[in-house]
Image (spheres, grey):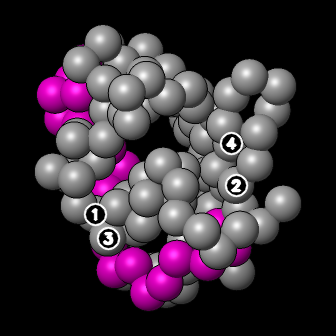
C-alpha cells in the first residue's frame, strides 16, 4: 500500500535519503532495539547514539551522492509498521540503486524496535 501521508516510516526514509543524522537520531526511542542485515554484514544498536554512530552514519557515508528518494511504501504487518523505499544515487563507479525494507514499532512517537533488510548498492 502506497501512501502520500507523512508517517514515521516515511519520515525515516526521507531523513535517511537526506543523510540527516540528527533527525534520524531524534526519531529513535532512548531504548531502541535495532537490528539490520546488509549483503555483507549484520548491524545492531541499543541506543540512538549507537545506532546513528555505528550504523546509520556508515550507511549514509556509503551513499555518496543521493539523486532521489523514490517508491516509498508504508503499511502494517500485524502489530508493526513497515516502510520500504528505494534510493537512486551516483558514486565513483556510476549510478546505483539501493532498496531497504524496515519493520518497526513506535512508542511515544519514536521508533522503539526496528528491523531493516538492505539490498546493498546495485547497478541499474
In reply to whether residue 56 is colored magenta, the answer given is yes
Q: CA distance from mark 3 to mark 1?
A: 4 Å
Comes first in the chain, label 2 or label 1: 1
Q: CA distance from mark 2 to mark 1?
A: 20 Å
Comes first in the chain, label 4 or label 2: 2
Horizontal side of 52 relative to 11 (left or right) equals left
Determine whether 114 is above or below 74 in the image: above
Image quarter of the N terminus: bottom right
The residue closer to the viewer here, 94 or 61, is 61
Residue ID for mark 4: 82
Mark 2, secondary structure of its residue: strand
Comes first in the chain, label 4 or label 1: 1
Residue at point 53%, 55% (across, down): 7
Which circle, 4 or 3, is nearer the viewer?
A: 4
Residue ID for mark 1: 19
**Label 3 with label 1: CB-CB less than 8 Å:** yes
Stretch of the chain drawn in magenta: 47-72
Q: Which mark is residue 18?
A: 3
Q: Which mark is residue 6?
A: none
Q: CA distance from mark 4 to mark 3?
A: 20 Å
Comes first in the chain, label 3 or label 2: 3
Q: CA distance from mark 4 to mark 1?
A: 20 Å
Image quarter of the C terminus: bottom right
Residue ID for mark 2: 74
Residue at point 49%, 29% (across, down): 106
Residue at point 71%, 68% (across, down): 3
Q: CA distance from mark 4 to mark 2?
A: 5 Å
The residue closer to the viewer here, 115 or 97, is 115
Task: State which quadrant residue 98 falls in.
Answer: bottom right
Q: Residues within 10 Å of mark 3 (few under 14, many from 20)?
A: some
Mark 4, secondary structure of its residue: strand
Task: State which quadrant residue 87 falls in.
Answer: bottom right
Amino acid at each position: 500500500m502506497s501512501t502520500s501521508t507523512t508517517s514515521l516510516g516515511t519520515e525515516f526514509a526521507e531523513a535517511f535519503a537526506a543523510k540527516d543524522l540528527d533527525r534520524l537520531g531524534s526519531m529513535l526511542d532512548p531504548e531502541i532495539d535495532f537490528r539490520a542485515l546488509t549483503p555483507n554484514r549484520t548491524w545492531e544498536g541499543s541506543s540512538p547514539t549507537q545506532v546513528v554512530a555505528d550504523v546509520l552514519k556508515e550507511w549514509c557515508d556509503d551513499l555518496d551522492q543521493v539523486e532521489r528518494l523514490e517508491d516509498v511504501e508504508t503499511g502494517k504487518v500485524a502489530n508493526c509498521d513497515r516502510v520500504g523505499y528505494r534510493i537512486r544515487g551516483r558514486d565513483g563507479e556510476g549510478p546505483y540503486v539501493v532498496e531497504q525494507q524496515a519493520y518497526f514499532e513506535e512508542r511515544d512517537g519514536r521508533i522503539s524496535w526496528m528491523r531493516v533488510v538492505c539490498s546493498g548498492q546495485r547497478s541499474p
